Image: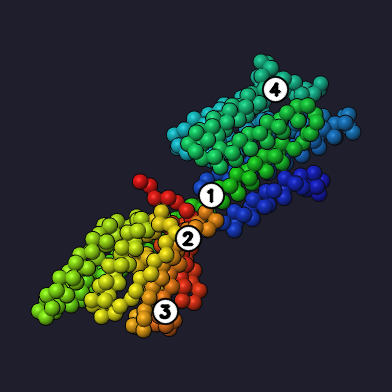
Amino acid sequence: MILTYLTSNFLTIMIIIALIIMMIVNRKLKIPATQYFYALIVVVMLLSVLDFVNAFLARELEQKPDFDPIFIRTVVDAISYMIRPIVIMIEVLVIQPKQKAKLFCVIPAVINSVWYSTALFGSKIAFYIDSDGWQGGVFHIQLVYVVQFLYVILLVVYSIRYFGRGNTKTGTIIMIIVLAALLTAFLENRNILTGYATTVAAFCVLLYYIYLATVYQEEMSELFEEKELHIAQQELLLLRGQLHSEFIFDTLSVIRSLAKTDKTASAAAIDSFSSYLRAHLNAIRDDKPIAFQWEIDCVKAYLELLKIEKNRTVELISDLETSDFELPPLLLETVASYCIGEKAGNDEALVIQTFKENEQVRVCLTANADKTERAENASGLETARSRLEMQCDGTLETDGPTVTMIIPQKPVMA
């Protein structure tokens, strides 16, 4: 008998086993509504057992006319009618976000259970079984189908709401479950495909769990990216702190010395320093992406101050096909600092090129600094790569002395 049950419910059992395995694998994850899926597994398996027992009793009646366990058939049918709407009710509870509304969703299933439990006490209100077989109740109302249809309507309503809020993924999954339930009911009513209601219910449960697990993974990924962005922002704050404590104060010290020896050079240095602060003002106040032209100004001011502070001249060569895009603040300066390295060389030059390719903007920086010196700023380049990816959905690549930034084309808003 057990072997017959396993073979006749093989597909349902395999689906439930797959769901259990997935839940075990994800047991450490906080996937929402997990507790409801445990209840769904129990209810679906119980339904499969009741369906099998019902079919078994029907075969026995056909083969043995003297076999007529009316009470057993009544108990099996009553319990089956009582728990059948619970499957779709739990699916509604999983989807329903509000706790108070969940209580109202339970009411139809409770009424249905009370209605069919009367058959266990000999009442003929819901249904009864006599020597002539199964008979409808006094009112000839199959409440189980009414309740299930009500829950289907609720699922449709929730699906429409999710679509209205722009959550097309959840809305689509709910609508697939609804269509699967309606199609199964239609095919069974027409006797085209019978005996698959429990299997389809198990499939819908597995489908929605997979969806919730996928959504959870996406949310965790987004949360991880937000944390990475926060870390990058903190690193930017550290960069700004270093900018103030080291570069600015060292430059002021140089300007002070020039003021005593060369007033003309001191005045020019003050102008360059003012340009530097003006170019960095937006970056200091806000971490939102800024226009590329502002970044160019930052690099120019940085190179001017580099000339004043360290007496190091780096020629800036610009070949800009486009400048209609944005970068995270101070990013171009960070990459430029990486390219030129720490130590001065002969005939130093920094080349910045921009051009469009396949709906992307490419920014290439090349300098004639030594590669080993350039490696000293590798950590700053990794921070730049992370910020470019998280804030502009771009990528940063290195190829020998060249650093290339690739940014999806997004025109600067006027």
Name the disc covering residue 127, or none. Answer: 4
Q: Nearer the viewer, residue 166 or 244?
A: 244
Measured as percent of width and height from the top left, residue 249 is found at: 19, 73
Q: Check disc 2 and report the residue beneath it.
A: 355
Please tell me which residue is depicted at 17% across the width and 69% down the height of the picture: 270
Residue 315 in picture, x, y percent from top left = 34, 74
The answer to which of 320 and 88 lies nearer the viewer is 320
Mark 1 — residue?
A: 215
Residue at figure coordinates x 56%, y 38% from the top left: 171
Q: Distance between the residues labelled 4 and 3?
A: 91 Å
The number of callouts visible is 4
User: Which residue is more in the foreground, 380 or 400?
Assistant: 400
Mark 4 or 2 closer to N-term? Answer: 4
Q: Which of marks 1 and 2 is nearer the N terminus?
A: 1
First reached walking from the N terminus: tag 3 or tag 2: 2
- Considering the numbered disc 2 on the image, is that residue within a helix, a strand or a loop? strand
The mark that comes first in sequence, 4 or 1, is 4
Labels 3 & 2 near each other (Cβ < 8 A): no
* Residue at image mark 3: 368
Left or right, residue 65 beside residue 83: right
Q: Which amino acid does label 4 sit on?
A: Phe
Numbered disc in front, either 4 or 2: 2
Mark 1 residue element: helix
